[in-house]
Image (cartoon, grey):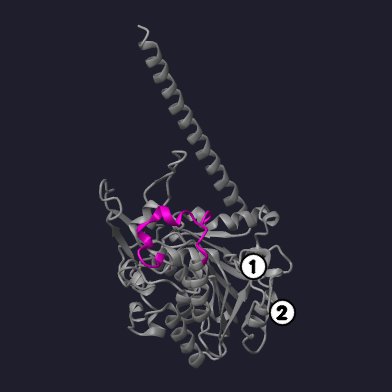
Amino acid sequence: MKRIIPVLTCALLAFALLSCSAQEQDRQNKQADLKVQMYMRSILKTWEMKTVADVPGYTFAPDPSLTPSCSNCPPKVDPATGAVTTYNPDFAFFVKKGDPTKLLVFFMGGGACWDITNCVYNHTYSESLFESVELLGLVSSGLGAQQGIGGFLDTHNQDNPFKDWTIVYVPYCTGDLNAGQEDHVYTDTYNTADPIANVTIRHRGAVNRDLVLKWMEANIPPAGVAQLFVTGLSAGSYASLLAFPYLRDIYTGGTAYYLGDAGVGYAGIDSGGNHFTDIAKDRWNVQLPAAVFGTTDISTFDEYKDVVHEGVDYYRTNKPGDRFAQYTTKYDKTQTWFYNIQVGDHIEYPDFWGSESGANPDLWVYKAWSDGMLDAIDIGLSNYAYYIGAGTDHTIIFSDKVYTETSGSTSFLGWVDSLINDVGIPASTACTVCNAPF
């Protein structure tokens, strides 16, 4: 009888803990739902949300079975708290109406994934629509101002040169630079002792992008657009460059500009000898825009720099007024973190690289990435310029740094203003005091 009392006590305590855990999880879920609702209400005061229902009869060519979607990643369990995060596969995009002659198309970032380790075990990309619009919600609600969040997406800021433009905001939730067109099956080669079942990630970024383009062509008259500004941050930097030719095929008049933010494309070679461009082809089935690249396969290029060079050079000849530019900090922490994941066999050690927010790359990794970045960002064409800021910050477009950043005695805001308003391309510029983390 004496033994049954502590046993019952332990059982009751365990039940109570489980009950508390369930209650805490329920509380967290309700808080998250309220947060989503609050942000969406704020967004919809300024922006219109569009879905596949707004493009009647939409189908994706060449594969109509692929419909617009986020990754549909399986639920993620936080090992520390037991909290379970699920992902809504629905895709939508957002439009702010403004001057019909000036059109800004913005592609949101959110990492990427190409292996069971970083698609499932240690997520390195945004899997849901809400993750991709949370910053927009912060800005739209006014809560971003105290955190320095706003930049060129804060259309209430009177210093914003794009505040009166028509803006299309393209979220990202597919892990493929918004350019994939494949549902890829990932087999567990990491936990061979107790493998998880095969996981299918919907790398349908190109499908989502195509939906946006079709809506734009039908609802933003091409004949009226005199200035087209295509931009994106992080993964959205790559997405915006790959989308530029499709947008330019629709909006053929006036002048077009491209600004990539923190997506230079310098990446390591993995232990199998694969380049970044091999991953883009094999895992995501990225197809290059035929208008510029013909039938050339992206994996033909060893370096992303070569993709940029060929694309920009095409417009140097065919649209000599169009201008291209890229921004990064010299020691961008997140780009360094992704470089570290890709190089050698590091992808096989998800506990080693840790979370992006907690990442602390070794100093040699910072130096290796920065040295490679300096070569990758300078493609040497007359219709192209770069801006290298100091420090380790990742991205600038959503930050109020756009109004304060100065590098090499050149303000970033003035540099962008020259890009979109002056006759020629602004000069490339780089920090002189770069605040190295080593």
Chain-order first, disc 2 or disc 1: 1
Residue at the (44%, 86%) spot, across then down? 310
The quadrant in which residue 152 appears is: bottom right
Magenta residues (range): 342-363
| Camera-nearest residue between 285 and 67 | 285
The quadrant in which residue 418 appears is: bottom right
Q: Which mark is residue 409?
A: 2
| Camera-nearest residue between 372 and 287 | 372
The quadrant of the rendering that contains the C terminus is bottom right
Q: Position of residue 170 (x, y in %)?
A: 51, 65
Q: Which mark is residue 204?
A: none
Q: Position of residue 391 (x, y in %)?
A: 62, 68
Asked if one can make out residue 206 in the rendered structure from this viewpoint, the answer is yes
Q: Position of residue 146 (x, y in %)?
A: 70, 54
Hey, what amino acid is under mark 2? Ser
Residue lying at the far right of the rendered structure: 158
Asked if one can make out residue 44 in the rendered structure from this viewpoint, the answer is no
Magenta stretch holds residue 31: no
User: In 3D space, how far apart are the residues under numbered discs 2 and 1 (Cα atoms)?
Assistant: 21 Å
Residue at the (48%, 55%) spot, across then down? 129
Residue that numbered label 1 is attached to? 152
Residue lying at the far bottom of the rendered structure: 317
Mark 1 residue element:
helix
- Residue 9 is left or right of residue 367, and the answer is left
Magenta stretch holds residue 349: yes
